[in-house]
Image (cartoon, grey):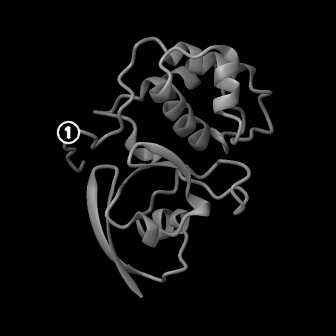
Amino acid sequence: MTRISVKVDGDSFTDEVEPRMLLVHYLRERLGKVGTVVGCDTSNCGACTVHLDEVSVKSCNMLAVQADGHEVTTIEGVARNGQLHPVQQAFHDNHALQCGYCTPGMVMQSIDVLRANPNPSEEEIRVGLEGNLCRCTGYQNIVKAVRQAAGGTNLSPVGASQGSEQA
């Protein structure tokens, strides 16, 4: 067992984990962050995308011990004060989901795309989301949602540069 200390969605955790435990399983099984889903276990689909120190990573392709000393933001951590994150709201407004399985990873990757480029073209959005797969929507409404969210929003996750309180 290896001891890790990690900040997840603004809260600090210290745990003993098996060195081979994937970050996605740590988040889901130990912390109850079930919004981060396991889609393929091969890093191909992106459903498990989270932010590590404000950069998107596929949590099925990362060990929990690699997150030691870092800050992780999950889909549960992007809403603030009961309000959806602008990207989440844009996905809702534009019906950018059907079954919803890929949605957490798509939202997390979209936030990262917009953080890197606050006003991306349609092509830049498509390239930015390239590693996240959706089997339902055909991506049209996802691209529309990202374009809507590009309208001058604060794209920092909960806990970044400000403390969060447990509910």
User: x and y percent of residue 134 in the render?
Assistant: 75, 38
21 left or right of 38 in image = left
- The residue sitting at 72% across, 61% down in the picture is 42
Q: Quadrant of residue 109?
A: top right
Toward which corner of the image does residue 32 lie, by quadrant?
bottom left
Q: Which residue is mark 1?
A: 162
User: Which amino acid is tagged 1?
Assistant: Gln
Left or right of 141 in this view: 164:
left
- Measured along the vertical axis of the image, is residue 137 above or below residue 163? above
Question: Image check: 88 left or right of 61?
Answer: left
What x and y, as percent, mark residue 7? 31, 58
Q: For the point 52% across and 14% down, which residue is it?
A: 119
Q: Specify whether residue 142 is in view.
A: no
The residue under the point 61% across, 61% down is 60
Q: Across the whole image, how many numbered discs are drawn on residues? A: 1
- Locate the N terminus and report the quarter of the image it occupies: bottom left
Residue name at image x 60 percent, y 54 percent: 37
Q: On the image, which quarter does residue 65 sit in?
A: bottom left
Q: Nearer the viewer, residue 97 or 140?
A: 140
Q: Secondary structure at mark 1?
A: loop
Point out the residue furthest to the bottom here: 1
